[in-house]
Amino acid sequence: MNFGKLFFLGFPDGFDDEALEIIRKYKPAGVILYPGNMKSVEELQISMDKLYNLDIPLLISSDHEGGQLETVPGILSSSGNYAMGKLGKPEYAYKYGKYLGEKLKEFGFNMVFSPVLDVLHKSSSAVTGFRAFSTSADVVAEYGIQYIRGLKESGILPTGKHFPGHGKAAQDSHEENAIVYDFSFDDEDIIPFKKSLKELEILMTSHVIYEPVDNDIASVSKIIINDFLKENLKFKGLVISDAIEMKAFYNNYYSKEGVIKFFNSGGDILMVAEARQNFKKLYAFFEEAIKDKKIKINVIQNKIKKIEDLQRKYYNKDYSGELLMDIAKRALKINIKNNFDKDNLTFLIPEAKNLSPADTTANDLEKLENLINSEFKNCKIIKYDPFTGSVNKLPKREESVVSFVLDSFRFKKQLNLQKKLKHFSSKVLYIIIRNDEDLENYLSESYIVTNSTKLISLYQAIKAFKKQFLKGEVSV
Protein backbone atom coordinates (compact mmCIF):
# COMPACT_ATOMS: atom_id res chain seq x y z
CA MET A 1 0.00 0.00 0.00
CA ASN A 2 1.19 3.52 -0.83
CA PHE A 3 1.03 5.64 2.32
CA GLY A 4 2.12 8.82 0.56
CA LYS A 5 -1.22 10.51 1.18
CA LEU A 6 -0.30 10.83 4.83
CA PHE A 7 2.35 13.41 3.92
CA PHE A 8 2.33 16.98 2.56
CA LEU A 9 5.47 17.80 0.59
CA GLY A 10 7.49 20.92 -0.22
CA PHE A 11 10.36 21.42 -2.68
CA PRO A 12 11.62 24.97 -1.98
CA ASP A 13 14.37 24.80 -4.61
CA GLY A 14 12.02 23.94 -7.47
CA PHE A 15 10.03 21.22 -9.19
CA ASP A 16 12.73 19.50 -11.22
CA ASP A 17 12.41 15.95 -12.58
CA GLU A 18 13.50 14.42 -9.26
CA ALA A 19 10.85 16.33 -7.30
CA LEU A 20 8.13 15.49 -9.80
CA GLU A 21 9.07 11.81 -9.71
CA ILE A 22 8.74 11.78 -5.90
CA ILE A 23 5.27 13.31 -6.19
CA ARG A 24 4.30 10.92 -9.00
CA LYS A 25 5.48 7.86 -7.11
CA TYR A 26 4.17 8.60 -3.61
CA LYS A 27 1.04 10.63 -4.49
CA PRO A 28 1.02 12.78 -1.33
CA ALA A 29 -1.96 14.54 0.19
CA GLY A 30 -0.64 17.71 -1.32
CA VAL A 31 2.21 20.04 -2.20
CA ILE A 32 3.11 23.42 -0.75
CA LEU A 33 4.63 26.08 -2.99
CA TYR A 34 7.35 28.21 -1.43
CA PRO A 35 8.88 31.45 -2.80
CA GLY A 36 11.52 29.38 -4.61
CA ASN A 37 8.73 27.79 -6.67
CA MET A 38 7.27 31.16 -7.69
CA LYS A 39 9.89 33.88 -7.88
CA SER A 40 7.64 35.56 -10.44
CA VAL A 41 4.11 35.10 -11.76
CA GLU A 42 5.56 33.40 -14.84
CA GLU A 43 7.51 30.90 -12.76
CA LEU A 44 4.38 30.26 -10.67
CA GLN A 45 2.49 29.44 -13.88
CA ILE A 46 5.18 26.93 -14.80
CA SER A 47 5.19 25.30 -11.36
CA MET A 48 1.43 24.88 -11.56
CA ASP A 49 1.60 23.41 -15.05
CA LYS A 50 4.10 20.81 -13.85
CA LEU A 51 1.90 19.81 -10.91
CA TYR A 52 -1.33 19.60 -12.89
CA ASN A 53 0.32 17.62 -15.68
CA LEU A 54 1.05 14.87 -13.16
CA ASP A 55 -2.73 14.29 -13.24
CA ILE A 56 -2.81 13.49 -9.52
CA PRO A 57 -5.60 14.98 -7.34
CA LEU A 58 -3.32 17.06 -5.15
CA LEU A 59 -4.13 19.67 -2.56
CA ILE A 60 -1.95 22.58 -3.72
CA SER A 61 -1.22 25.16 -1.03
CA SER A 62 0.90 28.11 0.02
CA ASP A 63 1.28 29.89 3.34
CA HIS A 64 0.17 33.26 1.96
CA GLU A 65 -1.72 34.91 4.83
CA GLY A 66 -1.54 38.59 3.91
CA GLY A 67 0.50 41.21 5.74
CA GLN A 68 3.46 39.77 7.63
CA LEU A 69 3.55 36.58 5.56
CA GLU A 70 2.98 37.05 1.83
CA THR A 71 4.56 34.58 -0.58
CA VAL A 72 2.53 34.39 -3.80
CA PRO A 73 3.47 36.90 -6.55
CA GLY A 74 0.67 38.75 -8.29
CA ILE A 75 -1.49 39.16 -5.18
CA LEU A 76 -1.87 42.75 -4.01
CA SER A 77 -0.27 43.41 -0.65
CA SER A 78 -2.44 43.57 2.47
CA SER A 79 -1.82 45.56 5.66
CA GLY A 80 -2.27 42.25 7.44
CA ASN A 81 -4.45 40.60 10.03
CA TYR A 82 -3.58 42.82 12.98
CA ALA A 83 -4.35 46.04 11.10
CA MET A 84 -7.59 44.50 9.89
CA GLY A 85 -8.53 43.50 13.42
CA LYS A 86 -8.21 47.12 14.55
CA LEU A 87 -11.09 48.20 12.29
CA GLY A 88 -13.88 46.64 14.31
CA LYS A 89 -15.44 45.36 11.08
CA PRO A 90 -15.07 41.58 10.61
CA GLU A 91 -16.60 41.88 7.13
CA TYR A 92 -13.20 43.10 5.96
CA ALA A 93 -11.76 39.70 6.87
CA TYR A 94 -14.46 38.06 4.75
CA LYS A 95 -13.73 40.39 1.83
CA TYR A 96 -10.01 39.80 2.05
CA GLY A 97 -10.49 36.04 2.35
CA LYS A 98 -12.67 36.11 -0.76
CA TYR A 99 -10.19 38.28 -2.68
CA LEU A 100 -7.25 36.09 -1.64
CA GLY A 101 -9.18 32.92 -2.45
CA GLU A 102 -10.15 34.12 -5.90
CA LYS A 103 -6.55 35.04 -6.73
CA LEU A 104 -5.21 31.74 -5.41
CA LYS A 105 -7.84 29.83 -7.36
CA GLU A 106 -6.95 31.69 -10.56
CA PHE A 107 -3.32 30.62 -10.22
CA GLY A 108 -4.22 26.97 -9.55
CA PHE A 109 -4.15 26.73 -5.75
CA ASN A 110 -7.00 24.92 -4.03
CA MET A 111 -5.80 25.28 -0.43
CA VAL A 112 -3.99 27.75 1.82
CA PHE A 113 -2.32 27.41 5.22
CA SER A 114 -4.33 30.26 6.66
CA PRO A 115 -5.91 31.83 8.69
CA VAL A 116 -3.80 32.27 11.81
CA LEU A 117 -6.11 31.80 14.81
CA ASP A 118 -3.44 32.54 17.40
CA VAL A 119 -4.03 35.31 19.94
CA LEU A 120 -1.37 38.00 20.29
CA HIS A 121 0.19 38.39 23.77
CA LYS A 122 2.87 40.69 25.14
CA SER A 123 5.03 37.57 25.43
CA SER A 124 4.43 36.50 21.81
CA SER A 125 7.52 35.92 19.70
CA ALA A 126 7.98 37.74 16.40
CA VAL A 127 6.84 34.59 14.58
CA THR A 128 3.33 35.34 15.80
CA GLY A 129 3.60 39.10 15.55
CA PHE A 130 1.06 40.83 13.33
CA ARG A 131 -0.08 37.54 11.84
CA ALA A 132 -2.64 37.51 14.68
CA PHE A 133 -5.88 39.45 14.27
CA SER A 134 -5.93 40.74 17.84
CA THR A 135 -4.97 40.48 21.49
CA SER A 136 -8.62 39.55 22.08
CA ALA A 137 -9.55 35.91 21.58
CA ASP A 138 -13.12 36.84 20.67
CA VAL A 139 -11.95 39.28 18.00
CA VAL A 140 -9.59 36.65 16.57
CA ALA A 141 -12.50 34.19 16.44
CA GLU A 142 -14.85 36.66 14.78
CA TYR A 143 -12.36 37.73 12.12
CA GLY A 144 -11.05 34.21 11.64
CA ILE A 145 -14.49 32.81 10.89
CA GLN A 146 -15.20 35.54 8.34
CA TYR A 147 -11.80 34.99 6.69
CA ILE A 148 -12.51 31.26 6.48
CA ARG A 149 -15.91 31.85 4.89
CA GLY A 150 -14.39 34.13 2.26
CA LEU A 151 -11.80 31.52 1.32
CA LYS A 152 -14.36 28.72 1.14
CA GLU A 153 -16.70 30.77 -1.01
CA SER A 154 -13.84 31.09 -3.49
CA GLY A 155 -13.29 27.33 -3.55
CA ILE A 156 -10.15 27.38 -1.41
CA LEU A 157 -9.64 24.97 1.51
CA PRO A 158 -8.66 27.02 4.62
CA THR A 159 -6.37 25.70 7.36
CA GLY A 160 -6.77 27.04 10.88
CA LYS A 161 -3.45 27.32 12.72
CA HIS A 162 -1.59 26.79 15.05
CA PHE A 163 -3.70 24.61 17.38
CA PRO A 164 -4.06 25.00 20.34
CA GLY A 165 -2.47 28.46 20.00
CA HIS A 166 1.10 29.70 19.49
CA GLY A 167 0.52 33.16 20.94
CA LYS A 168 1.76 32.57 24.49
CA ALA A 169 5.05 31.08 23.31
CA ALA A 170 7.92 33.53 23.78
CA GLN A 171 10.18 31.36 21.61
CA ASP A 172 10.02 30.77 17.86
CA SER A 173 9.45 27.05 17.27
CA HIS A 174 11.24 27.39 13.92
CA GLU A 175 14.46 28.00 15.83
CA GLU A 176 14.19 26.36 19.27
CA ASN A 177 11.99 24.51 21.72
CA ALA A 178 8.94 26.63 22.52
CA ILE A 179 7.22 26.20 25.88
CA VAL A 180 4.01 27.65 27.30
CA TYR A 181 3.89 27.46 31.09
CA ASP A 182 0.47 29.03 31.64
CA PHE A 183 -2.13 26.90 29.88
CA SER A 184 -5.29 24.84 30.41
CA PHE A 185 -8.05 23.48 28.20
CA ASP A 186 -10.18 26.44 29.29
CA ASP A 187 -7.50 28.83 28.02
CA GLU A 188 -8.68 31.85 26.06
CA ASP A 189 -6.25 30.98 23.25
CA ILE A 190 -8.44 27.99 22.41
CA ILE A 191 -11.57 30.16 21.92
CA PRO A 192 -10.85 31.02 18.23
CA PHE A 193 -10.35 27.34 17.42
CA LYS A 194 -13.47 26.21 19.32
CA LYS A 195 -15.63 28.78 17.53
CA SER A 196 -14.16 27.96 14.11
CA LEU A 197 -14.31 24.16 14.21
CA LYS A 198 -17.65 23.88 12.40
CA GLU A 199 -16.19 25.95 9.54
CA LEU A 200 -12.93 24.00 9.22
CA GLU A 201 -12.06 20.73 7.54
CA ILE A 202 -8.38 20.81 8.49
CA LEU A 203 -6.32 22.22 11.38
CA MET A 204 -2.56 22.71 11.70
CA THR A 205 -0.89 21.96 15.03
CA SER A 206 1.83 23.95 16.73
CA HIS A 207 5.24 22.56 17.66
CA VAL A 208 4.86 24.05 21.14
CA ILE A 209 5.02 22.31 24.52
CA TYR A 210 2.07 23.19 26.77
CA GLU A 211 3.74 22.14 29.98
CA PRO A 212 0.69 22.01 32.30
CA VAL A 213 -0.96 19.34 30.11
CA ASP A 214 1.87 17.43 28.37
CA ASN A 215 5.65 17.30 28.07
CA ASP A 216 5.48 16.67 24.30
CA ILE A 217 4.82 19.30 21.66
CA ALA A 218 1.18 19.58 20.58
CA SER A 219 1.92 17.95 17.22
CA VAL A 220 2.64 14.60 18.88
CA SER A 221 0.45 14.96 21.97
CA LYS A 222 -2.35 12.39 22.28
CA ILE A 223 -3.78 14.44 25.14
CA ILE A 224 -4.10 17.54 22.96
CA ILE A 225 -4.96 16.08 19.53
CA ASN A 226 -6.93 12.91 20.19
CA ASP A 227 -8.35 13.37 23.67
CA PHE A 228 -9.09 17.09 23.61
CA LEU A 229 -9.50 18.12 19.95
CA LYS A 230 -11.08 15.01 18.46
CA GLU A 231 -12.94 13.51 21.43
CA ASN A 232 -13.77 16.46 23.67
CA LEU A 233 -14.29 19.14 21.00
CA LYS A 234 -15.66 16.57 18.48
CA PHE A 235 -13.50 17.81 15.59
CA LYS A 236 -14.17 15.53 12.61
CA GLY A 237 -11.70 17.06 10.20
CA LEU A 238 -8.04 16.35 9.48
CA VAL A 239 -5.02 17.36 11.55
CA ILE A 240 -1.82 18.38 9.75
CA SER A 241 1.46 19.14 11.48
CA ASP A 242 3.45 22.29 10.98
CA ALA A 243 6.67 21.66 9.03
CA ILE A 244 8.80 18.89 10.55
CA GLU A 245 11.95 20.89 9.69
CA MET A 246 11.16 23.41 12.40
CA LYS A 247 13.74 22.78 15.11
CA ALA A 248 11.20 22.20 17.88
CA PHE A 249 10.11 19.11 15.93
CA TYR A 250 13.23 18.17 13.95
CA ASN A 251 15.62 18.17 16.91
CA ASN A 252 13.34 16.01 19.04
CA TYR A 253 10.99 13.94 16.88
CA TYR A 254 12.62 13.33 13.49
CA SER A 255 12.76 9.62 14.15
CA LYS A 256 10.69 6.47 13.89
CA GLU A 257 9.39 7.17 17.42
CA GLY A 258 8.36 10.69 16.38
CA VAL A 259 6.42 9.36 13.39
CA ILE A 260 4.69 6.79 15.60
CA LYS A 261 3.83 9.45 18.17
CA PHE A 262 2.31 11.77 15.57
CA PHE A 263 -0.02 9.22 13.97
CA ASN A 264 -0.93 7.46 17.22
CA SER A 265 -1.74 10.79 18.84
CA GLY A 266 -4.42 11.57 16.26
CA GLY A 267 -2.34 13.35 13.60
CA ASP A 268 -3.35 12.69 10.01
CA ILE A 269 -0.81 14.41 7.71
CA LEU A 270 2.87 15.15 8.32
CA MET A 271 4.19 18.30 6.63
CA VAL A 272 7.65 17.82 5.10
CA ALA A 273 8.89 21.20 3.86
CA GLU A 274 12.23 19.89 2.53
CA ALA A 275 10.93 16.71 0.95
CA ARG A 276 13.99 16.15 -1.22
CA GLN A 277 16.14 15.76 1.90
CA ASN A 278 13.74 14.42 4.51
CA PHE A 279 10.74 12.64 3.06
CA LYS A 280 12.08 9.23 2.05
CA LYS A 281 13.63 8.64 5.47
CA LEU A 282 10.37 9.58 7.20
CA TYR A 283 8.45 7.34 4.84
CA ALA A 284 10.78 4.44 5.66
CA PHE A 285 10.20 5.11 9.37
CA PHE A 286 6.47 4.93 8.74
CA GLU A 287 6.66 1.66 6.77
CA GLU A 288 8.75 0.10 9.55
CA ALA A 289 6.20 1.21 12.13
CA ILE A 290 3.37 -0.36 10.12
CA LYS A 291 5.37 -3.57 9.66
CA ASP A 292 6.11 -3.70 13.40
CA LYS A 293 2.43 -2.99 14.14
CA LYS A 294 3.34 0.12 16.08
CA ILE A 295 0.70 1.97 14.03
CA LYS A 296 -2.63 0.26 13.33
CA ILE A 297 -3.34 -0.21 9.63
CA ASN A 298 -7.11 0.23 10.01
CA VAL A 299 -6.57 3.64 11.62
CA ILE A 300 -4.34 4.65 8.72
CA GLN A 301 -6.85 3.46 6.12
CA ASN A 302 -9.49 5.67 7.70
CA LYS A 303 -7.14 8.67 7.54
CA ILE A 304 -6.37 8.02 3.87
CA LYS A 305 -10.08 7.84 3.02
CA LYS A 306 -10.72 11.23 4.64
CA ILE A 307 -7.75 12.73 2.79
CA GLU A 308 -8.97 11.36 -0.54
CA ASP A 309 -12.45 12.78 0.11
CA LEU A 310 -10.92 16.22 0.65
CA GLN A 311 -8.79 15.92 -2.49
CA ARG A 312 -11.84 15.02 -4.58
CA LYS A 313 -13.77 17.96 -3.15
CA TYR A 314 -11.16 20.64 -3.87
CA TYR A 315 -9.08 19.42 -6.82
CA ASN A 316 -10.16 20.72 -10.23
CA LYS A 317 -7.74 20.45 -13.11
CA ASP A 318 -9.53 23.14 -15.10
CA TYR A 319 -8.36 26.16 -13.13
CA SER A 320 -8.78 29.43 -15.02
CA GLY A 321 -5.06 30.18 -15.45
CA GLU A 322 -4.60 26.87 -17.27
CA LEU A 323 -6.10 28.49 -20.37
CA LEU A 324 -2.94 30.55 -20.87
CA MET A 325 -0.69 27.49 -20.76
CA ASP A 326 -3.00 25.75 -23.22
CA ILE A 327 -2.70 28.65 -25.68
CA ALA A 328 1.11 28.64 -25.36
CA LYS A 329 1.21 24.90 -26.02
CA ARG A 330 -1.16 24.96 -28.99
CA ALA A 331 0.71 27.86 -30.61
CA LEU A 332 3.88 25.77 -31.03
CA LYS A 333 4.99 24.55 -34.42
CA ILE A 334 7.36 21.62 -33.95
CA ASN A 335 9.71 19.81 -36.31
CA ILE A 336 12.48 17.89 -34.53
CA LYS A 337 14.42 15.56 -36.82
CA ASN A 338 17.38 14.42 -34.74
CA ASN A 339 17.99 12.57 -31.52
CA PHE A 340 19.83 14.85 -29.15
CA ASP A 341 22.32 13.91 -26.48
CA LYS A 342 20.58 14.96 -23.25
CA ASP A 343 23.80 14.47 -21.27
CA ASN A 344 25.83 16.78 -23.49
CA LEU A 345 23.60 19.77 -24.18
CA THR A 346 24.58 23.36 -24.87
CA PHE A 347 22.00 26.15 -24.98
CA LEU A 348 22.59 29.35 -26.90
CA ILE A 349 20.35 32.10 -25.53
CA PRO A 350 20.05 35.81 -26.38
CA GLU A 351 21.12 38.40 -23.87
CA ALA A 352 18.14 40.01 -22.13
CA LYS A 353 17.42 42.98 -24.36
CA ASN A 354 14.24 44.67 -25.56
CA LEU A 355 13.99 45.16 -29.30
CA SER A 356 11.96 48.36 -29.10
CA PRO A 357 10.45 50.77 -26.54
CA ALA A 358 7.16 48.86 -26.96
CA ASP A 359 8.71 45.54 -25.95
CA THR A 360 9.21 43.67 -22.66
CA THR A 361 11.05 40.67 -24.09
CA ALA A 362 13.98 41.24 -21.73
CA ASN A 363 11.80 40.48 -18.69
CA ASP A 364 11.28 36.92 -19.90
CA LEU A 365 14.78 36.39 -21.25
CA GLU A 366 16.17 37.29 -17.82
CA LYS A 367 14.38 34.21 -16.43
CA LEU A 368 15.27 31.84 -19.26
CA GLU A 369 18.64 30.77 -17.88
CA ASN A 370 17.12 29.66 -14.55
CA LEU A 371 14.38 27.79 -16.41
CA ILE A 372 16.90 25.89 -18.52
CA ASN A 373 19.06 25.02 -15.50
CA SER A 374 16.03 23.67 -13.64
CA GLU A 375 15.06 21.45 -16.57
CA PHE A 376 18.48 20.20 -17.65
CA LYS A 377 21.06 19.40 -15.01
CA ASN A 378 24.72 19.98 -15.95
CA CYS A 379 23.96 21.63 -19.28
CA LYS A 380 26.04 24.50 -20.69
CA ILE A 381 24.62 27.93 -21.44
CA ILE A 382 26.18 30.42 -23.84
CA LYS A 383 24.77 33.93 -24.25
CA TYR A 384 24.92 35.91 -27.47
CA ASP A 385 24.12 39.50 -28.42
CA PRO A 386 21.01 39.37 -30.64
CA PHE A 387 21.98 42.55 -32.51
CA THR A 388 25.64 41.82 -33.27
CA GLY A 389 25.76 38.02 -32.99
CA SER A 390 28.83 38.33 -30.78
CA VAL A 391 29.53 35.46 -28.44
CA ASN A 392 32.33 34.62 -26.02
CA LYS A 393 32.65 31.00 -27.09
CA LEU A 394 31.10 28.46 -29.41
CA PRO A 395 29.88 24.91 -28.74
CA LYS A 396 32.09 21.90 -29.26
CA ARG A 397 31.62 19.38 -32.03
CA GLU A 398 30.35 16.61 -29.75
CA GLU A 399 27.71 18.80 -28.14
CA SER A 400 24.03 18.92 -29.06
CA VAL A 401 22.93 22.53 -29.39
CA VAL A 402 19.62 24.24 -28.70
CA SER A 403 19.64 27.83 -29.92
CA PHE A 404 16.96 30.41 -29.17
CA VAL A 405 16.51 32.61 -32.23
CA LEU A 406 15.43 36.23 -31.68
CA ASP A 407 14.49 37.87 -35.00
CA SER A 408 17.62 36.73 -36.81
CA PHE A 409 16.02 37.82 -40.12
CA ARG A 410 16.39 41.42 -38.86
CA PHE A 411 19.96 41.03 -37.62
CA LYS A 412 22.22 39.54 -40.25
CA LYS A 413 25.17 39.06 -37.91
CA GLN A 414 22.98 37.01 -35.59
CA LEU A 415 21.78 34.98 -38.58
CA ASN A 416 25.40 34.28 -39.52
CA LEU A 417 26.03 33.04 -35.98
CA GLN A 418 22.97 30.80 -36.06
CA LYS A 419 23.95 29.25 -39.39
CA LYS A 420 27.56 28.84 -38.25
CA LEU A 421 26.38 26.53 -35.46
CA LYS A 422 26.00 23.69 -37.98
CA HIS A 423 29.76 23.84 -38.54
CA PHE A 424 30.36 23.14 -34.86
CA SER A 425 27.65 20.57 -34.15
CA SER A 426 25.75 18.10 -36.29
CA LYS A 427 22.74 18.31 -33.96
CA VAL A 428 21.19 21.75 -33.67
CA LEU A 429 17.64 22.67 -32.69
CA TYR A 430 16.47 26.21 -33.40
CA ILE A 431 13.75 27.61 -31.15
CA ILE A 432 12.30 30.61 -32.95
CA ILE A 433 10.86 32.76 -30.21
CA ARG A 434 9.60 35.93 -31.82
CA ASN A 435 8.68 36.45 -35.47
CA ASP A 436 7.85 33.35 -37.49
CA GLU A 437 9.20 35.13 -40.56
CA ASP A 438 12.47 33.66 -39.26
CA LEU A 439 11.25 30.18 -40.15
CA GLU A 440 12.22 30.68 -43.81
CA ASN A 441 15.86 30.56 -42.68
CA TYR A 442 15.51 27.24 -40.85
CA LEU A 443 13.04 25.12 -42.83
CA SER A 444 15.62 22.41 -43.47
CA GLU A 445 16.60 22.28 -39.78
CA SER A 446 15.10 20.92 -36.58
CA TYR A 447 13.01 23.73 -35.14
CA ILE A 448 10.27 24.81 -32.77
CA VAL A 449 8.35 28.00 -33.39
CA THR A 450 6.79 29.50 -30.25
CA ASN A 451 5.13 32.61 -31.76
CA SER A 452 5.85 34.26 -28.43
CA THR A 453 8.73 35.41 -26.25
CA LYS A 454 6.79 34.90 -23.00
CA LEU A 455 8.39 32.55 -20.48
CA ILE A 456 5.40 30.21 -20.50
CA SER A 457 5.86 29.78 -24.27
CA LEU A 458 9.59 29.17 -23.92
CA TYR A 459 8.77 26.63 -21.23
CA GLN A 460 6.31 24.84 -23.54
CA ALA A 461 9.02 24.66 -26.21
CA ILE A 462 11.47 23.18 -23.71
CA LYS A 463 8.82 20.72 -22.56
CA ALA A 464 8.22 19.61 -26.15
CA PHE A 465 11.97 19.20 -26.65
CA LYS A 466 12.25 17.05 -23.52
CA LYS A 467 9.54 14.74 -24.87
CA GLN A 468 11.78 14.15 -27.86
CA PHE A 469 14.26 12.35 -25.60
CA LEU A 470 11.57 9.86 -24.70
CA LYS A 471 9.71 9.39 -27.97
CA GLY A 472 12.23 10.00 -30.71
CA GLU A 473 11.08 12.03 -33.72
CA VAL A 474 8.38 14.61 -33.05
CA SER A 475 6.58 16.45 -35.85
CA VAL A 476 3.46 18.58 -35.51
Image: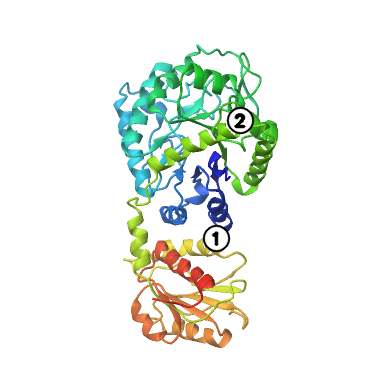
Q: Secondary structure at mark 2?
A: helix
**Residue 190 in view of the camera:** yes
Residue where numbered disc 2 is placed? 262
Q: Quadrant of residue 327 in the image?
A: bottom left
Residue 160 image offset from top left, x and y in percent: 45, 29
Please state which of residues 380 and 32 is positioned toward the viewer in this rendering. 32
Residue where numbered disc 1 is placed? 374
Q: Is residue 35 above or below residue 386?
A: above
Disc 2 to disc 1, C-alpha distance: 34 Å
- Dot 2: few (<14), some (14–19), or many (≥20) neighbours within 10 Å? many
Q: Residue at x 47, y 66 (%)?
A: 463
Residue 415 image offset from top left, x and y in percent: 44, 84
Q: Is residue 79 above or below residue 191?
A: below
Q: Quadrant of residue 117 in the image?
A: top left
Residue 154 lies left or right of residue 458; in this view the side is left
Residue 185 image offset from top left, x and y in percent: 52, 13
The quarter of the picture where the N terminus appears is top right
Residue 50 lies left or right of residue 278; in this view the side is left
Residue 169 image offset from top left, x and y in percent: 57, 22
Q: Amino acid at mark 2?
A: Phe
Q: Is residue 32 above or below residue 51?
A: above
Please state which of residues 28 and 169 is positioned toward the viewer in this rendering. 28
Q: Which mark is residue 41?
A: none
Q: Secondary structure at mark 1?
A: helix
**Residue 173 in view of the camera:** no
The quarter of the picture where the C terminus appears is bottom left
Q: Amino acid at mark 1?
A: Ser
